[in-house]
Amino acid sequence: MLLIRCPHCGDRPEVEFRHGGEAHLARPPEPAALSDAEWAAYLHQRRNPRGPHAERWRHIHGCGRFFNAVRDTLTDRFLATYPTGAARPDGTQQGDPA
Amino acid sequence: MSMRRFSLLSLAREALRGHSGWQPQWRSPPSPAAAYDAVIVGGGGHGLATAYYLAREHGMRRIAVLEKGWIGGGNTGRNTTIIRSNYLFPESAALYDHALKLWEGLSRELNYNVMFSPRGVLMSAHSVHDIQSFQRHIHANRLAGVDNEWLTPEQCKAFCPPLDISPHARYPVLGGALQRRGGTARHDAVAWGYARAASALGVDIIQNCEVTGIRREGPGGAVSALETTKGLVRTARVGVVAAGSTSLVMAMAGLRMPLESYPLQALVSEPVKPVFPCVVMSNTVHAYISQSDKGELVIGAGTDQYTSYSQAGSIQILTHTLDAITEMFPMFRRMRMLRAWGGIVDVTPDRSPIIGLTPVPGLFVNCGWGTGGFKATPGSGHVFAATIAKGEPHPIAAPFNLARFETGRMIDEAAAAAVAH
Ligand SMILES: Cc1cc2nc3c(=O)[nH]c(=O)nc-3n(C[C@H](O)[C@H](O)[C@H](O)COP(=O)(O)OP(=O)(O)OC[C@H]3O[C@@H](n4cnc5c(N)ncnc54)[C@H](O)[C@@H]3O)c2cc1C
Ligand SMILES: [Zn+2]
């Protein structure tokens, strides 16, 4: 079980959280202007990297809030957690394939 | 290399001379040749089967399987080996039943005992929703020519005596869907049997050879070579069959996939005498179980909620699974567990696999089998080989194209079955 630091509540066990998938996926402002391929890419394509991964979590059995985290998917170690809306912290990018 | 056939005579002869005459069952050259007609990336069951059918049915000879570790060391050697074909949609039923028909003759075809055991797969129903959903599956399956039948709780108990059908159980068994042709097979033997048969047809199986790059110097950005930890391998046709690592391999060609990789765990108990005659799956209580020929109870757990390449999952997933197993089978409450492990499964948005062409000429992909692809191994290899050899999708593979995420023609087994094994 992971120990996850909610930016609002501190360290809590994983069972209090829900994983919310890849972070920083902005919904295109004008979906109708996109090609089918672009829309499909937004909906379905994921980086799925082996290494640091920016992802959303929700502290569903705590404060209820969404936040972001960078976790190394090879070791499952968290490199950082940060509030939604904040930029991905410096120094957490390497190893992430394009 | 000519393959020495297994027969009663050869077994008896070796028994008499202390088993000193057996040869390695397949060739595993230390490094790849400079060029091949086709290269399969990934030496799991699906990749080895693909190579075998390429050689056997399509007459290709210069074929290599490149495996970063040892063959069968991925999900093939980590799965709970449940085999069935009673999927809801006609496309899925056609694909999985194609595989099931091949399983039925596979030991003979490969001259290798894959221990396919059609002992029946029983899915137990615990709610009105389960009953309606299973009966819908049964009707759809019968229309598709796939066996699947409804059992009352008493018939379930007769088919699987360890099952607790008392109305006082926490999740009473209200009935079940039984596919009698379903069952299990020996996972390692599937990898080894295909490797041996492919090797005999001239396929090079290179282990400890990781693909690290895909060169696209052919016309229109076509595949021209693979970079590997054992040097450059030139080829114009590449089949990627890398399960949980597919996103990483496809990224080498500049493609982003509709896949996420999750840990999936399983565990086995200490071995005991035969106590469990079939396979039981419960989607609602979330437990599935069978007994191996070694006597261990083989128990499958769920995926973790987060993506990972760690090949290890969380402890609470295992305890949850054992809670469910002992709830349904109280007789196992004092059984000790021997080992637990994890594999990394590649999951698509609609929980159906992807088999076919890609936007990169010469690059083919077979992935997205997620938590339930072992059962499809022979069929998957068979239709993927045809797709690679002809450069167009085999009819059974065609609906499982990568473009469906763009066209919207999903095969939504995710909605059809909460757990898909
Ligand atoms: C715990 C568990 C239980 C399961 N239970 C069932 C079940 O009961 N029934 C069922 O039908 N399915 C089940 N599955 C799913 C099933 O195991 C898989 O869908 C199936 O085995 C996939 O086969 P494969 O040959 O594609 O993958 P694998 O056997 O994983 O083969 C892929 C291979 O690619 C290699 N590879 C990866 N990257 C590279 C690279 N860059 N270069 C070279 N080689 C590379 C890997 O080392 C690996 O050997 C289960 C899976 C798990 C983990
Ligand atoms: Zn919180």
Image (cartoon, coloured by chain):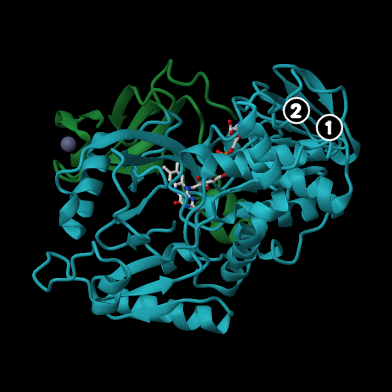
Residue B411 x/y as whole percent: 55, 66
Name the image quarter holding residue B13.
Answer: top right
Q: Is residue B15 above or below residue B334?
A: above
In the image, which disc is placed on residue B27?
Answer: 2
- Residue A72: x percent and y percent? 41, 24
Residue at the outermost left position: B168
- Residue B255's place in the image compared with B143, above or below, is above
Say which colour chain B has.
Answer: cyan
Indicate the position of residue B264 as horizontal and vertical percent values: 40, 42
Q: Quadrant of ligand 2?
A: top left
Few, some or many residues within 10 Å of mark 2 (<14, 14–19, 20+)? some
Q: Residue at x 27, y 42 (%)?
A: B317
Q: Amino acid at mark 1?
A: Met
Contact between marks 2 and 1 (CB within 8 A): the answer is: yes
Q: Nearer the viewer, residue B26 or B252?
A: B26
Residue located at (82% from left, 44% from top) = B361
Q: Which residue is mark 1?
A: B1
Q: Earlier in the sequence, mark 2 or mark 1?
A: 1
The chain that hosts pointer 1 is: B
Mark 1 near ligand 1 (CB under 8 Å)?
no
Q: Secondary structure at mark 1?
A: loop
Secondary structure of residue under mark 2: loop
B316 shown above or below B408: above
Could you tell whether B75 is left or right of B312 in the image? right
Report whether B302 appears left or right of B24. left
Residue in view at x 32 percent, y 71 percent: B159
Residue at the image position 58 percent from the left and 80 percent from the top:
B145
Question: What is the C-alpha distance between the residues marked 2 and 1?
Answer: 8 Å
The amino acid beneath tag 2 is Arg
Q: Would residue B47 be visible to someone looking at this image? A: no
